């Protein structure tokens, strides 16, 4: 299955959340891969703590593959090549976890040629043979990478795909996420142009809320009653706004709580970070685990 | 004499095995003559030979710039209606002129690459065997894999493969026997990232049967590699019996019956297979794995019977 991760704005935690989903899915026993389609700033290597490709690879990554300069993009076995001690031993029963990094000094494409599209179709077809889940991390906003993803999936009717739209739990982010999907040059309109059926495509798009602060969270206990009441009111307004914009509960696949580890150091959260060093919250891992299951759970994707 | 090739092997993207008639259809996508098939002892279908013209650098261990012009011979095959292979090879010859000739010259010599200047066979052979990270040299594996991609994209396949599996790459190099050294030689090495290398020393020179042998070895190496992964993932002894059996089921359904080393090969190649059976011992490892799979299934059946009070 192909899963495309996209957000309208930067700083939503799209990459770090997607990476953690991929990691949780691998722990759950699936073969997974992560493709860095953020050609302008490939940083997935840093999240997976593979320092040799922290800013992209020099050995031929996604960008050079699409340019047709290499036949096979550089692939990295994360279990074997990560610098993090705690991740290096693949637990028994866990699946493959492979990173396809971008190129150092790659840059965004200014157009999608037919050749690039054919290369994309070929890449997706081959990866689908080998991996249960291929997560494609697209850059923020409307990009040529997103256009290519829509065009390629339209040509691959046999390959299941899903889209995750990441947004923070704020007024502007809710409106922006709505625009990215429903707007004039949004995913749905572009998808229909590339030959997708609009309704079917809409059924394959879900939202993920990131950095969510629940009004009843333990962190908020020290707040004054007036502050709590105000927060509750804001949250209620946001829920109402989200519902009006079609970004509400029914079209949401999951939400990730605000976690300092994700904010200050974008990285994979291992069970060790929760249990032994206790720097991360158990709720965050539970949210990743839940998302990793729901991504492949058909009942979570039934037509709205 | 120097012949080099690469075989890539993977699972045909279909829910079940495909019948012989469908093999004709999926391999017939590659233009050319008829698809050849044989039924005994296992259904095997192979596409007509495909030629790809190349003018490019060849890998060499010394990193010398070696330019070769000619054609690559490729074909795709399906074994047991289940396993797909893409195979390409070239014979290296010295060019008689010092410049590129018209393509009709090269087309008349299918599968021959002519190299300019003086080259040493061991230099090219070592370079090719180790050419993993070279992006600017002839990549025979990619040439063959293109034809695999065409087959996998066939509308006759449902793309619902029963399990995920990676394609393996077997890179092979065959050279003529040197005077003073005895008999056929074979060396098989497992590398990183599912790359295997095979070095052959042939007393009787190159025949197309050598390609058959390499494809047969690649097929069995893929079967063994794939079954090893399935058994490892089943977490025998840790997961519940039902979970283990569910993970092993695709192997029983789709792989176990395909093991037939040297089934279609000329008798001349028997000594080479025998050498591989001694070490690393392909069939020994396969049989031990198969026994393990069947024992697990049997134990689960007994457990189910006991639960049902049936004994």
Image: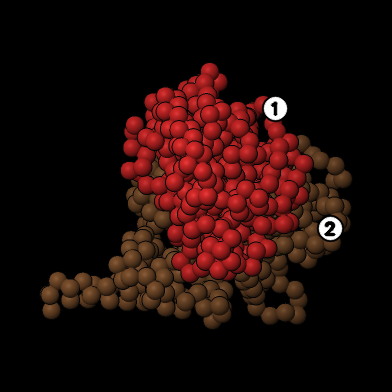
- Work out whether B164 lies above or below A88: above
Name the residue at 52% across, 45% down: A223
Q: Where is residue B62 in the image (x, y as percent from the top left)?
A: 84, 61
Tell me the chain of label 1.
Answer: A
Label 2, on which residue? B63
Whether residue A288 is visible here, answered yes or no, is no
The front one of B294 and A159 is: A159
Tell me the chain of label 2.
Answer: B
Which colour is chain B painted? brown
Q: Residue A110 carries which label?
A: 1
Name the residue at 61% across, 32% down: A9
Whether residue A111 is visible here, answered yes or no, is yes
Is A284 on the left or on the right of B96, as rendered?
left
- Work out whether A42 lies above or below B305: above
Label 1 packing within 10 angstroms: few (<14), some (14-19), many (20+): few
Name the residue at 72% across, 53% down: A53
- Work out whether B240 lies above or below A157: below
User: Decide: marks 1, 2 in contact (CB < 8 A)?
Assistant: no
Quadrant holding the C terminus of chain B: bottom left
Q: Is the same chain shared between marks 1 and 2? A: no
Q: Where is residue B110 in the image (x, y as percent from the top left)?
A: 65, 47
Label 2 packing within 10 angstroms: few (<14), some (14-19), many (20+): few
Asked which secondary structure carries label 2, the reply is: loop
Which colour is chain A painted? red
The front one of A96 and B298 is: A96
Q: How far apart are marks 1 and 2 (CA)?
A: 36 Å
Name the residue at 52% across, 57% down: A281
Q: Residue A268 carries which label?
A: none
Asked which secondary structure carries label 1, the reply is: loop
């Amino acid at each position: 299955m192909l899963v495309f991760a996209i957000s309208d704005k930067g700083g939503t935690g799209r990459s770090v959340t997607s990476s953690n989903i991929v990691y949780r899915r691998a722990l759950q026993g699936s073969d997974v891969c992560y493709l860095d389609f953020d050609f302008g700033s490939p940083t997935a290597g840093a999240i997976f703590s593979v320092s040799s490709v922290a800013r992209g690879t020099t050995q031929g990554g996604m960008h050079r593959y699409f340019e047709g300069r290499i036949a096979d993009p550089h692939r990295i076995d994360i279990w074997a090549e990560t610098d993090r001690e705690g991740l290096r031993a693949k637990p028994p029963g866990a699946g493959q976890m492979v990173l396809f990094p971008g190129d150092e000094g790659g840059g965004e494409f200014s157009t999608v040629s037919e050749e690039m599209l054919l290369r994309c179709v070929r890449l997706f077809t081959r990866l689908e043979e080998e991996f249960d889940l291929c997560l494609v991390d697209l850059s923020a906003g409307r990009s040529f990478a997103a256009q290519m993803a829509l065009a390629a999936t339209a040509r691959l009717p046999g390959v299941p795909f899903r889209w995750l739209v990441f947004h923070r739990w704020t007024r502007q982010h809710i409106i922006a996420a709505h625009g990215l999907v429903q707007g004039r040059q949004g995913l749905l309109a572009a998808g229909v142009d590339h030959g997708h059926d609009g309704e079917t495509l809409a059924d394959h798009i879900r939202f993920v809320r990131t950095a969510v602060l629940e009004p009843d969270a333990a962190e908020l206990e020290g707040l004054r009653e007036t502050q709590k009441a105000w927060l509750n009111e804001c949250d209620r307004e946001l829920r109402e706004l989200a519902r009006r914009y079609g970004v509400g509960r029914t079209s949401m696949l999951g939400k990730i709580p605000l976690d300092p580890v994700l904010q200050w150091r974008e990285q994979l959260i291992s069970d060790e970070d929760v249990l032994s060093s206790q720097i991360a919250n158990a709720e965050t891992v539970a949210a990743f685990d839940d998302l990793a299951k729901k991504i492949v759970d058909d009942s979570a994707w039934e037509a709205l | 004499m120097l012949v080099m090739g690469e075989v890539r092997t993977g699972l045909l993207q279909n829910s079940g095995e495909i019948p012989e008639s469908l093999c004709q259809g999926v391999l017939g996508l590659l233009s050319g003559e008829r698809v050849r098939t044989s039924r005994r002892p296992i259904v095997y279908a192979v596409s007509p030979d495909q030629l790809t013209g190349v003018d490019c650098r060849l890998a060499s261990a010394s990193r010398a710039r070696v330019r070769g012009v000619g054609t690559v011979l490729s074909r795709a095959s399906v074994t047991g209606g289940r396993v797909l292979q893409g195979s390409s090879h070239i014979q290296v010859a010295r060019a008689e002129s010092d410049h590129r000739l018209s393509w009709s010259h090269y087309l008349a010599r299918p599968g021959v690459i002519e190299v300019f200047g003086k080259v040493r066979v061991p230099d090219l052979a070592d370079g090719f065997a180790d050419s993993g990270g070279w992006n600017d040299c002839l990549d025979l594996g990619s040439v063959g894999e293109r034809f695999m991609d065409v087959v996998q994209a066939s509308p006759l396949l449902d793309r619902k493969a029963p399990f995920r599996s990676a394609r393996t790459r077997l890179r092979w190099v065959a050279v003529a026997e040197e005077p003073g050294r005895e008999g056929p030689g074979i060396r098989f090495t497992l590398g990183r990232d599912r790359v295997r290398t095979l070095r052959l020393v042939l007393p009787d020179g190159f025949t197309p049967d050598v390609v058959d042998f390499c494809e047969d070895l690649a097929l069995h190496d893929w079967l063994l590699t794939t079954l090893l992964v399935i058994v490892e993932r089943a977490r025998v002894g840790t997961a519940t019996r039902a979970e283990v059996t569910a993970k092993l089921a695709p192997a029983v359904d789709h792989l176990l019956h395909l093991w037939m080393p040297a089934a279609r090969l000329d008798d001349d190649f028997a000594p080479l297979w025998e050498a591989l059976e001694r070490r690393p011992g392909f069939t020994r490892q396969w049989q031990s794995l198969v026994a393990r799979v069947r024992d697990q299934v049997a134990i689960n059946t007994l457990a189910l019977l006991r639960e049902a009070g049936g004994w």
